[in-house]
Amino acid sequence: MRPDFHRTYARAVARLAGTLVGVALATGAVEALGPDARLFGALAVVSAGLSYTLIRTGYAYSQCFAAAYVVFLLGMGGQAWEQTVPERMALTLLGGALAMLAYAVFPAWETPRLRERLADWLAANGRHAAAVLRHFAEPTADRRADMRSAQLASRRARAAWQEAYDRAQQEPVRPRGLTAQEAKAAQEALEGFDRAATLMESRVPHDDNPSAPEVEALAEALESDTEQAAAAMREHRDPDWARVEKALQTWERAGGRSPALRSEADLQKHALENLATAVSRTPLERDVGSLREDQRVREAVEAQGDGSEPAHRGG
């Protein structure tokens, strides 16, 4: 078994197909060559070597030669293939069926966790962008180290998202939380946000030449809003960028320096708006969610009322 459905299913099919082909070819060779222990020993050694050699090339090829190895070993001992080959085939089928049954009973779908992975990536991207802006505001060695650490964390979060997204594309599960189109749009938005942060990082000052104080305020707003937006996404709520908008408006009124940096900050704001559009619920979905929440509250109140009435009568 593997941690995702596609690889578990693919390995089960490859094992079955490889075993069938290997047993068929080796059995035909044993029947055609007749009893020859030395020849079968040589073929067994070759089959074992090819099985290990091809284990990373293709699982089916490796299993094919592993099955042939077993048949040739049995041929060396003078045993007829009818004595063990059917058992091996039956056990292979049983093992594959058990693996698929275990995955069906205890699935590890990535599709329902896409929103969680996306939220992690958003929060990591926000911390990276904030670290870059803080380095602009106060270029020191400590802030450069923080920027590098945040960049690596952002890359890890992106890799985790990409792995989950690729697995979800191959799962036979209906989208829950994010549809394929929403996930793709959200990914493109965060990639745009990351590109803007990379542009900023390519121009960070290397000397003690701090930028306008508005840059520090924008860094705080970005980190705060992305953290809160990540939490909102995990709870299926719409993200909000109020602090970022306020910080950019303050920067605009101040008429500070670094017009290129301000342009890149606008790119980040645009990317965040695209992300909000991708993951936000429609008015109908919000209405349905509100109705469900109201129903849940009413049921909870009724349950409390049912539990309190007997106690009141008993008193």
Image (tube, helix red, strand yellow):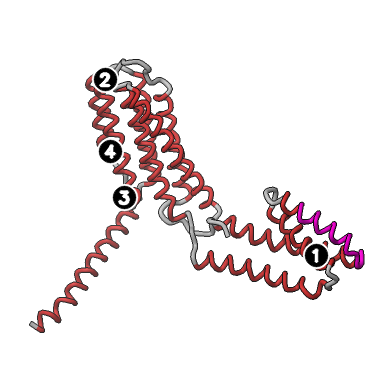
Residue pointed to by mark 3: 237
Q: Amino acid at mark 2?
A: Ala
* Mark 4 → mark 1, Cα distance in angstroms: 66 Å
Foreground mark, 3 or 2, reads 2
| Whether residue 21 is visible | no
**Quarter occupied by residue 81:** bottom right
* Labelled disc at residue 224: 4
Q: In the rendered image, which residue does mark 1 sit on?
A: 73
Relative height, residue 248 to residue 257 (above, below): below
Looking at the image, is mark 2 or mark 1 earlier in the sequence?
Answer: 1
Residue 48 inside the magenta-drawn segment: yes
Precedes in sequence: disc 4 or disc 3: 4
Q: Residues within 10 Å of mark 3 (few under 14, many from 20)?
A: some
Q: Amino acid at mark 1?
A: Leu
For mark 2, what is the residue? Answer: 212
What's the distance in space between the residues labelled 4 and 3, CA to CA? 16 Å
- The amino acid sitting under disc 3 is Arg
